[in-house]
Image: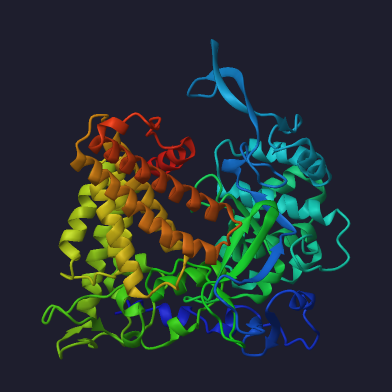
């Protein structure tokens, strides 16, 4: 079933051709044509698809399809003090003291506090930090143009704000425009794409709502007040266009400080202009230090197939994905997953409602006029399209029918209760959130009302897992995480080796390791308890082995994530061997002390990773 509903939806959603002024077909070769010599791709341009890439030959899963170094990227402000502003590596720090502040931000007399201070930093703005003197020197060319303005800009936002990052990015664009550009594009990601190519990325400015443009202009004026040379109508207009280009085309990458939460953001002209979105992509983007991203094949791609990546969360209903892409990327998705009839698509499960008669089929309504804003629907049922009134949804297994209005009402109740639980979770009311999510699974899950693969069920299991982990109920956290993985894999809504599932497998393995570690604290253990602990390590390794094979495909063997997974697997092997050796020694007392005892505490890097996940 797809929520079709808003009376004003069909008229408000424009056809794909009118979302953005469509560029005329260019007969000139792509400016990135040199990349064809080293990557298995062909640059194409057609009236129907505009710019896009196709496979030059058959491409095996895990193959590097394309790589690009950004001409303009920044780290996010919330990691400004811990990652190098030039290469994104972690910076060395030293302990320092500073006056302790009260709640109003005023120094408390005769009181100080210790903190970590970057060893290499800019003494003028006190914002830019580096991993080495070499990176400081390399960054000086661009930083010297930003330093004064950056100090004033950061002072306007004492706490982390996405608006600060947007303005910092515009400041970077302005500073880059003052430098001499590279003469030509060179493939291989050793050098950055020429800065001038950014202007070729569509800005979609004409499709931004007036209110958004007004808010953007107001923010840009803060930068104009700091950088006097921008205080003219032409410069302000250019900044607005760049802001629209940034908002609709940015790529987040490099999750160093917290897995799954990206630390850097940038524009990649070659990728933004040529790699199209799909809700069942055949490739994925991974980021690295130095502003480089790489596109790898998720599965075998036949010759001539279009290369695609995703620009939205894939495990959500069709109308949610399309709305997100429309509002944030200014594209109307017509990929195969979004275009085929709902009854033949995995999307039937994403907001699937189980038939109340046979309890096996799903209620399907094929006319999919997707909701532009689901909150409007929830507030006002009268937004249902007149054409839908009196229409019926039919069970995919039996002949049972219900009105679409009744179908929407069922989903409306499910959404309201989910939002209530998720609000408590976001508010860090962990115990209350757990209670509400468990009630939600009980009332709507188990194929009672919603299909097991329904996105609201899966998206309840994941925060529920985090709640249980925070409350130190690790067995329940393991159970819910396993269930979420099973549902996501069985639904076939995500392509093979897709990072979202891999990250859940890693999280599951971490929780199992944490649970095994908690059971290992007791030095006096029976053979039965040792066997249970051994089973936990074997179970964790099973999920890590799968994650390792997936990360080899999506990230490559040289990636930090692949090496991290290997480290986890080595831990599982080592502790399994320790238990086996201990069991053997217990059975043969004469040889009990022939081996030196091993510290059964997990390595500190494993503990740090577990603690980060536990603190979510």
Is 568 on the left-hand or right-hand side of 555?
left
Query: Which sits in the foreground, 257 or 230?
Result: 257
Q: Quadrant of residue 134?
A: top right
Q: How is the image coloured?
A: rainbow
Tell me: 31 left or right of 1: right
Instruction: Tell me the quarter of the picture where residue 368 sits.
Output: bottom left
Tell me which residue sits at (76%, 31%) in the image. Answer: 124
Choose top left, top right, bottom left or bottom right for residue 581.
Answer: top left
Pick the quarter of the image with the N terminus: bottom left
Q: Residue 519 at what x, y percent from top left?
A: 26, 37
Instruction: Say whether residue 143 is left or right of residue 599.
Output: right
Q: Position of residue 416 (x, y in %)?
A: 26, 61
Which residue is located at x 57 percent, y 52 percent? 560
* Location of residue 522 with respect to 402 vertically, above or below: above
The single residue placed furthest to the left in the displayed view is 357
Closest to the observer, 302 or 322: 302
The count of marks equals 0
Residue 419 x %, y %: 30, 57
Task: Residue 83 in the image: state x and y as whole percent.
Answer: 63, 41
Q: Is residue 544 visible?
A: yes
Is the residue 479 above or below the residue 406 in the image? above
Left/right of residue 134 with respect to residue 106 in the rendered view: right
- As drawn, which residue projects farthest toward the top? 110
Q: Quadrant of the C terminus?
A: top left
């Amino acid at each position: 079933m797809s929520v079709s509903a808003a009376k004003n939806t069909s008229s408000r959603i424009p056809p794909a051709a009118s979302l953005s002024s469509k560029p005329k077909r260019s007969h000139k070769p792509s400016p990135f044509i040199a990349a064809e010599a080293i990557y298995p791709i062909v640059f194409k341009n057609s009236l129907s698809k505009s710019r896009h890439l196709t496979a030059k030959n058959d491409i095996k899963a895990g193959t590097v399809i394309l790589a690009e170094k950004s001409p303009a990227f920044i780290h996010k402000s919330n990691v400004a003090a811990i990652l190098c502003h030039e290469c994104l590596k972690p910076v060395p720090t030293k302990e320092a003291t500073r006056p302790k502040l009260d709640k109003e931000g005023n120094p408390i007399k005769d009181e100080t506090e210790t903190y970590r201070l970057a060893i290499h930093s800019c003494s003028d703005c006190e914002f830019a930090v580096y991993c080495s003197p070499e990176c400081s020197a390399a960054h000086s060319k661009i930083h010297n143009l930003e330093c004064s303005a950056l100090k004033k800009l950061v002072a306007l936002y004492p706490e982390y704000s996405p608006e600060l990052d947007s303005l910092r990015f515009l400041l970077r664009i302005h500073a880059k425009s003052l430098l001499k550009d590279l003469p030509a594009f060179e493939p291989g990601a050793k050098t950055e794409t020429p800065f001038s190519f950014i202007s070729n990325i569509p800005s979609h400015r004409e499709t931004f709502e007036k209110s958004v443009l007004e808010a953007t202009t107001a923010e840009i004026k803060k930068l104009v007040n700091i950088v006097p040379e921008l205080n003219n109508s032409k410069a302000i207009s250019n900044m607005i266009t760049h802001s629209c280009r940034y908002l609709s085309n940015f790529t987040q990458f490099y999750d160093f400080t917290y897995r799954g939460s990206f630390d850097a953001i940038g524009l990649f002209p070659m990728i933004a202009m040529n790699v199209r979105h799909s809700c069942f992509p055949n490739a994925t983007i991974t980021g690295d230090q130095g502003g480089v991203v790489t596109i790898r094949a998720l599965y075998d791609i036949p010759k001539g197939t279009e290369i695609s990546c995703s620009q939205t969360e894939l495990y959500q209903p069709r109308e949610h994905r399309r709305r997100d892409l429309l509002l944030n990327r200014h594209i109307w998705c017509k990929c195969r997953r979004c275009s085929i009839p709902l009854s033949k698509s995995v999307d039937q499960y994403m907001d699937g409602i189980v038939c109340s008669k046979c309890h096996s089929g799903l209620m399907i309504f094929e006319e999919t006029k997707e909701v532009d804003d689901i909150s409007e629907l929830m507030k006002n049922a009268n937004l249902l399209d007149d054409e839908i009134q009196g229409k019926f949804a039919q069970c995919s297994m039996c002949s049972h029918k219900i009105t679409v209005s009744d179908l929407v009402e069922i989903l409306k109740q499910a959404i309201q209760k989910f939002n209530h639980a998720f609000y408590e979770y976001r508010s860090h009311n962990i115990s209350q959130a757990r209670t509400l999510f468990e009630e939600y699974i009980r009332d709507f899950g188990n194929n009672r009302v919603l299909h097991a693969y329904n996105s609201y069920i899966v998206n309840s299991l994941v925060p529920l897992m985090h709640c249980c982990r925070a409350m130190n109920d690790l067995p329940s956290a393991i159970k819910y995480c396993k269930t979420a993985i099973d549902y996501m894999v069985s639904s076939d809504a995500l392509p093979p080796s897709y990072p979202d599932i891999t990250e859940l497998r890693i999280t599951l393995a971490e929780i199992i390791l944490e649970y095994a570690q908690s059971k290992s604290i007791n030095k006096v253990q029976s053979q039965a308890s040792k066997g249970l602990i051994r089973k936990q390590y074997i179970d964790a390794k099973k999920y890590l082995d799968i994650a390792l094979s997936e990360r080899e495909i999506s990230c490559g063997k040289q990636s930090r994530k692949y090496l991290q997974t290997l480290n986890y697997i080595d831990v599982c092997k080592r502790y399994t061997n320790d238990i086996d050796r201990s069991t053997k020694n217990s059975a043969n007392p004469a040889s009990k002390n022939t081996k030196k005892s091993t510290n059964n505490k997990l390595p500190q890097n494993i503990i740090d990773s577990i603690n980060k996940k536990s603190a979510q």
